Amino acid sequence: MVTGFENIQKLGKDNMDVAMQSFGAFSKGMQAISAEVADYSKKSMEESSAAMEKVVGAKSLDKAMEAQADFAKVSYESMVGQATKIGEMYAEIAKDAYKPYEGMLSKAAK
């Protein structure tokens, strides 16, 4: 009877340890994504400001439109690249959060 209780207690502790490892990986990944988004936002605002100065300072309408078109192209490419990077980071979070459970699941399968 006592060993059964000890086994259940150990299983509960092991489950809690695995859950905490998984939560730690998830939390760390979300912090990295938050930092990445903040950096991208800051960079985007700086680029937008520089582009606006370029458009306003253009000597002709053609140059202003060219500057605007260049900014739109660079902004779009940057946004797509950032979205791809964030998507990869989310996939990595999922993998890292699942890793602690792999060992547990392989034990259960035996």
Image: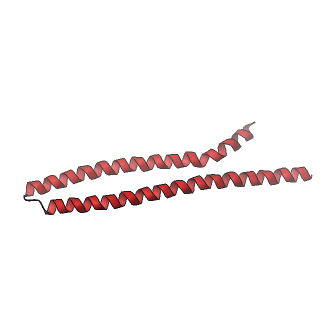
Q: Position of residue 55 (x, y in %)?
A: 16, 60
How many numbered tags mark residues here?
A: 0
Which residue is depicted at the point 56% across and 54% down? 26
Q: Residue at 30% x, 62% y: name it.
A: 45
Q: Is residue 8 above or below residue 105?
A: below
The spot of residue 20 in percent (x, y) is: 66, 55
Relative placement, left or right, of 20 versus 32 is: right
Relative placement, left or right, of 4 versus 83 is: right
Residue 54's quadrant in the figure? bottom left
> Which quadrant would the C terminus be assigned to in this image?
top right
As drawn, which residue projects farthest toward the left?
A: 60
Q: Residue at x 9, y 54 (%)?
A: 62
Q: Residue at x 81, y 54 (%)?
A: 9
**Scheme of image coloration:** secondary structure
**In the rendering, at what x and y percent does residue 59 appear?**
7, 59
Name, please, the residue furthest toward the top.
110
Residue 96 left/right relative to 107: left
Image side of residue 45 versus residue 100, left or right? left
